[in-house]
Image: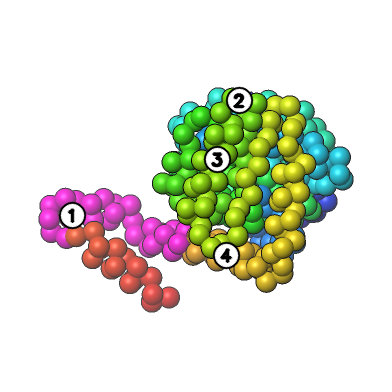
Amino acid sequence: MKELVEKILKGNSAAIAKGISLVENNPNDGQTLMKEIFRHAGNSIIVGITGAPGTGKSTLIDQMIDTLVKDGKKIGVVAVDSSSPFTGGAILGDRIRMMRHSVHPDVFIRSMATRGHLGGLAKTSGEALYILEAAGKDILLVETVGVGQDEIEVVKLADIIVVVLMPGSGDEIQIFKAGIMEIADVFVINKADFPDAEKTEHQINAMLDFGKKGEATLPVLKTVASEGQGIKPLLEAINRIVESRGKIARAERRKKRISFLLKEIISDKLFKEAMKSIQSVDFDEYVDDVYNNSADPYTIAEQIIGSLKRY
Ligand SMILES: Nc1nc2c(ncn2[C@@H]2O[C@H](COP(=O)(O)OP(=O)(O)O)[C@@H](O)[C@H]2O)c(=O)[nH]1
Ligand SMILES: [Mg+2]
C-alpha cells in the first residue's frame, strides 16, 4: 500500500489505475488508500463536460487534451455513462477516441463502468478525482451524459460545467427540464459544421436571456471538435471563469465536494454497521414481519439504528 501511494503521488499511470480500481472494487483497501492520499489532493481544476450521447464530448475532450498537453499540463479524464445498462459500446468508443493520448505519461484516461458501484457512482467518481488530484494533475476532465440523476451528481463535483449540444437535436429542451441550465457555466454547440448551427445558437441565447434575467450571460461557443476548431476559445473561456472566481468561490466549491463525500461516507458506514448488527436470518424475519403486516419497515429501521446508538 505504501508503495502504491508513493507511486500515485508521483503521477504513475499504472498506480493511478490500480488505486481507482481499489476504490471501485475493494472498499476496505480503497478506504486505506483514500486516507493516505486525501491530504495531497485539492489542487486540480475540475471541468465537467456534459451533454447527450453523440454530441461529441469525447471528441472535444480528445482535442482539449491535445492542446493542454502541448501547453505542458497534466491531465486526468474520467468518463462516466450510466444511460445504458450496456455501456460497453460507449466506453469502447470513448477509449478509442481518446486512446492516442493515453500513452502520454502526463495523461490519464479512465472510463468508469457504472452499475454495481458500492456506495454509488458519484462517490466512486469523486474518489477517483481525489486520486487524480493527489497524482498532481492540473486539469481533470469529467465526461458525463447529462441525463441520469447519478450523472448530474457527478457533474456537480466539477468546478466548471461545460454543456455540449449539437445543432438540430432539440437537446435544449432536455437541458431545461433536467436542471442542467442552472449549473452550466459554458455552452458549447459542437458540430458547428452542421447547417443548423446558427439557429441552435440563437435558440440557446434566447433561452439564456429568458432563464437568467439580470445575471451575466453565459458564454455560448461553437466548435467543430472533429476538426479541432474552436478548442482554444473554449479553453480560454474556461480559464477566464477560473480566474474570475477567486479564492473564496473556489474554497466554497471544494467544501461542497468534501461535504458530499463526507455524507456519502457516513451513510455508507452507518448502513454497514446496521447490517452487521443484525443476522441475515433476522433480516429475513423482518421482511416476513412486514409481509405479514405485523410490523412496518420504518419502525424496524428505527429499531435497528436505535440499537447502534448504545456504542
Ligand atoms: N460533423 C461532425 N462530427 C463530429 C464532430 N465532433 C464529433 N463528431 C462525431 O460525432 C460522433 C460522436 O462523437 P463522440 O465524441 O463519441 O460523442 P459523445 O457521445 O458525446 O462522447 C463521432 O462519430 C464523432 O466523430 C463535429 O464537430 N462535427
Ligand atoms: Mg463519449
Label 1 vs label 3, nearer the camera: 3
The percent coordinates of residue 50 (x first, y second) are 57, 42
The percent coordinates of residue 105 (x first, y second) are 83, 39
> Looking at the rendered structure, which numbered label has been put on residue 256?
4
Mark 4: few/some/many CA within 10 Å (<14, 14-19, 20+): some
The percent coordinates of residue 54 (x first, y second) are 56, 29
Q: Are marks 3 and 4 in contact (CB under 8 Å)?
A: no
The first of marks 4 and 1 along the sequence is: 4
What secondary structure prevails in the magenta region? helix
Amino acid type at circle 1 is: Val
Mark 2: few/some/many CA within 10 Å (<14, 14-19, 20+): few
- In this view, the residue farthest toward the bottom is 310
Asked if 96 appears above or below 143 in the picture, the reply is above
Magenta span includes 283: yes
The first of marks 1 and 3 along the sequence is: 3
Mark 2 close to ligand 1, CB under 8 Å: yes
- In this view, the residue farthest toward the left is 293
Q: Which residues are magenta?
A: 267-295
Q: Are marks 2 and 4 in contact (CB under 8 Å)?
A: no
Q: Using the image as rendered, state which of residue 12 and residue 154 is in the foreground.
A: 154
Which residue is located at x 74 percent, y 56 percent?
240
How much space separates mark 4 and mark 1, taking CA atoms?
Answer: 38 Å
The first of marks 3 and 4 along the sequence is: 3
How much space separates mark 2 and mark 4, taking CA atoms?
Answer: 38 Å
Amino acid type at circle 4 is: Lys
Q: Is residue 98 visible?
A: yes
Label 2 vs label 4, nearer the camera: 2
Q: Are marks 2 and 1 in contact (CB under 8 Å)?
A: no
The part of the image, by quadrant, that contains residue 252 is bottom right
> How many numbered markers are drawn?
4
How much space separates mark 2 and mark 1, taking CA atoms?
Answer: 58 Å
Q: Which residue is mark 3?
A: 202
